[in-house]
Image: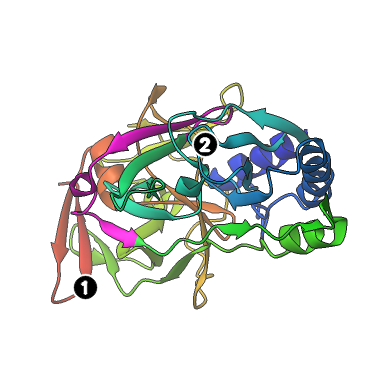
Amino acid sequence: MKKKLIALILALAAAGTVSVPGAYAANENWRDAFVTRLMKTISQDPTYTDVVLTDLDRNGIPEAFVIKKGTYGNIGSGFTMTDNTITDIEVPSNIIGECLENISVYIKNDNYVFVGQEVPRYSSYVAYYKLVFDGAKLTATRINKIDVSPYSNVTYVDKYSNNLLENGYPNRTKILDFISSYDVVNNISATVSDAKVLVNGEETSVKGYNVNNTNYFKIRDIAMILRSTSAKFNIEYLSDDNAIDIVPGADYVSNGTELVDDAAGAIEAVENDMPIYVNGRSTAITAYNINGSAYFKIRDIADAVGFEVQWDGDAQSINLVTE
C-alpha cells in the first residue's frame, strides 16, 4: 500500500500538483524484511550461500537472488518487495547464477538494457544474456555482444556476497551488514543543462537538466511556454491507470509550479515508471523524475504535440517552431 501511495504522490508531482523532495527514495522497510527472508532461505539449504542484490526495474528496491555456485539452474530463489510485502520472483533455469553477479547496462534509444555475462565451468567462452524483470518474473534471453556493443555503457553496480555463514549457519549480523551496504548504488546523476529554450526565436526562462548526455525539461514548463501557440497542450493525470496523459490542442491549465528555477548542481534522476499517454494512447516515451517533477526530451514532446525542433550546437539553443 505504501508503494502505491508513493506512486500516487509521484504521479501528482509529475503533473505538477505537489512537490515531492526525495519521494522516490526506496522504502526502508525492505531491509528488515530481506534479512528475515534470507535467514529463512539459507537455513533451509545452507548450500545456497551466494546472494545478489540488483535493481533491474529501477524502482529503488532491489531484487534478491539466492545462488548455489557452479551449475545451470542454480538460482535457488528470488524475491523483492511489492506493496510493502515480500513477493517471490520466478527465476530462469537457462543461466548460472554468476550471470547476475556481472551485469552491464547499456543505453539503447533512451532505454536501459541489462546484460549479464557468464563463463560456465571448464570453459572460457563468455555468454551474454539480456535480463528483463517484469515485476514477477526474471527472463534471460541469449544475445550476442555485438547486439549491444554499439550503445553507450552506463556504470552499474550490483551487490554480491558469499560470506553470510558462520559455523555453517546464516549469520544475521553478516546478512544485515550486507543488506545495509546496498544504499543507492546506481543513481543516475542529472546535471544542470546549458541549453537555452526558444519559442519561434524568442528566448524563454526554461531551465533543464542533462541526463546521460541528453537534455530533459519539465513538461509543465514546456506546456506553459507553448500555451499561446498552435502547439498548445494540456497535462492530465489518469488515476485509474496511474498515468500521465498529454492532450494536444487542449488549453493548458496552469497550477503555478511552472518556470521555477530550482536547478542546483547534480541531483538524482529516477526513471519515471508511470505509463505516459498521448490522447489516451500508451507511448514508449522515456521520462525522469527530478525534484519531484516529470522531465521529458523536447523532441518526444514535439512528436506527441506537433511542432518543429531546431538545435543550434554553437549557441547551445533549442528553438521550438510552431509557426
- Residue kind at label 2, given as amino acid type: Met
Q: Is residue 224 above or below residue 182?
A: above
Q: Nearer the viewer, residue 208 or 252?
A: 208
**Residue 67 rendering spot, x and y as whole percentages:** 61, 43
N-terminal of the pair, mark 2 or mark 1, is 2
Q: Within 10 Å of the Cα at label 2, are there few (<14), some (14-19), or many (20+) other Cα atoms?
A: some
Mark pair 2, 1: CA separation: 30 Å
User: Residue at the spot x=49%, y=49% of the render?
Assistant: 98
**Residue 84 rendering spot, x and y as whole percentages:** 78, 37
* Element carrying mark 2: loop
300 vs 18, left or right, is left
* Element carrying mark 1: loop
The range drawn in magenta is 133-153
73 vs 4, left or right, is left
Q: Which mark is residue 316?
A: 1
**Residue 107 rendering spot, x and y as whole percentages:** 31, 52
- Residue kind at label 1, given as amino acid type: Gln
Q: Within 10 Å of the Cα at label 1, are there few (<14), some (14-19), or many (20+) other Cα atoms?
A: few
Q: Nearer the viewer, residue 225 or 62?
A: 62
Q: Which mark is residue 274?
A: 2
- Tag in front: 2 or 1: 2
Residues at discs 2 and 1 in contact (Cβ within 8 Å): no
